[in-house]
Amino acid sequence: MSEQSYKKDLQGKELSPETLMMSYGYDPKLSEGSIKPPVFLTSTFVFKTAQEGKDFFNLVSGRTQTSENHKQGLVYSRFNHPNSEIVEDRLALYEGAESAALFSSGMSAITTCLMAVLQPGDVLLHSQPLYGGTETLFLNTLARFGITSVPFQNGYEQESILDVAKRIEKGKKVAAIYIETPSNPLNTLVDIELISQVAKQISTNQNGQIPLVICDNTLLGPVFQKPLSLGADLSVYSLTKYVGGHSDLVAGAVVGRQELVKKVKAQRNAIGTQLDPHSSWMLGRSLETLQLRMERANESAKILAEYLHQHPKVSKVHFPAFFPEGSVEHQVYQKQCTGAGSTFSINVGSNEADAFRFLDNLAIFKLAVSLGGTESLASHPASTTHSGVAQKVREHIGISDNLVRLSIGIENVNDLKYALELALEAI
């Protein structure tokens, strides 16, 4: 691509991400003047010379470094392709990162990332609750490779987290701290800056080796929360959710420092978790409206959460903006979030039967898992996304049988409110 397509300013004025999402990293002159990037449906790319082929393979495999004389080129679509590179550049720009890598799903992003930075015998310290798929990955898959996962519940109390770390078997190294904030589906928060400090403290007991801080930023990022600016080393996403935003693709990403993302990309090359050109192109389309969609859904969610908070058949609304003023949680929210997002859970009625009755009578909302799409969705975490988590763990972290998760879309908010009202009348 031309240097002009990577300009981030206009005569010295820095341009905002929502402006740059329309053009950054793409030069129409290189594609017959097409205003939008074409979908590059190819498995392989032609080299100009044999030497160029050798140079590109050395670069993509990490044997040599990029320089003025050696710039990375296109080799094979398992390694890189134009559609993924454009979106990676734009996503990194949105979060203020040096680099980004796309993946075939959020879980493939998390798995590839952890495979790149963990070794057998390492300890992975992590916040809880987590998305059910992540919890299952840690307990069932990583354990088979000799990686121990150790949870902590209080993500904003330093001594509590350090106390958990102290109980880790002597001689074991905490290689990474994995956090999800806000958590899915309870919207509990983890203080990202605090976790960065905890990582440094843990290093004093393991020969100065600082654990990496990896943050799942799916629920608020990159619009309402930027973990890298708060001390996280890597930010991971299910792009299926808000970034994709239309419930029509499955994708994931890892965002962070160049040297770390390079390691993650090398692992991606080895195990083949790259995202395909068409899905990458669709993500590029979605990034253009990301700010609009997330802000609109955020506004509607606040109105609906306020309504549900006052309803007698709803005992609790798990919404970040509702943390009591002056509480530690509220302070963390104010410090690291610029919006509450549009996915939250409610405790409705008193049992599973009440929750199911509510869901079966809920119009407009689609009864489906996932979140962050243009349409509103509703689901029952205990029997779906978190059904693979042991019941004892579910109960401990608050995923009860009467918990319902709502993902607010961009429909008319009054229509959504009326639909919720009718469903609550059925209990």
Image: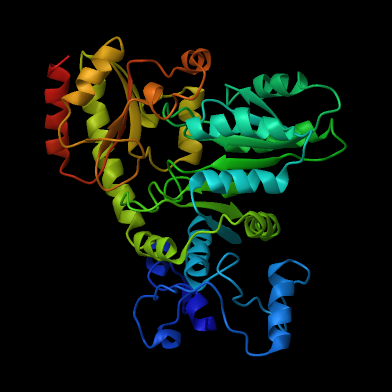
Residue 407 horizontal side relative to residue 210, left or right:
left
Q: Which residue sits at x=58%, y=26%? A: 156
Q: Which residue sits at x=46%, y=43%? A: 218
Q: Can residue 401 be seen in this view?
A: yes
Q: Which residue sits at x=35%, y=40%? A: 371
Residue furthest to the top: 350
- Along the line of sight, which residue is nearer the eye, 9 or 360? 360
Q: Which residue sits at x=22%, y=14%? A: 313
Question: Residue 227 at what x, y percent from top left?
Answer: 55, 45
- Along the line of sight, which residue is nearer the eye, 156 or 412? 412
Q: Is residue 324 visible?
A: no
Establish if 349 lies above or below 368.
above
Question: Residue 362 at what x, y percent from top left?
Answer: 17, 28
Please give the count of numbered marks on the rendered protein: 0
Residue furthest to the front: 43
Q: The C terminus is located in which quarter?
A: top left
- Along the line of sight, which residue is nearer the eye, 30 or 220? 30
Give residue 23's quadrant in the image: bottom left
Establish if 412 lies above or below 264.
above
Question: Residue 79 at what x, y percent from top left?
Answer: 60, 66
Residue 21 horizontal side relative to residue 52, left or right:
left
Question: Residue 290 at what x, y percent from top left?
Answer: 35, 55
Residue 361 horizontal side relative to residue 74, left or right:
left
Colour mapping? rainbow
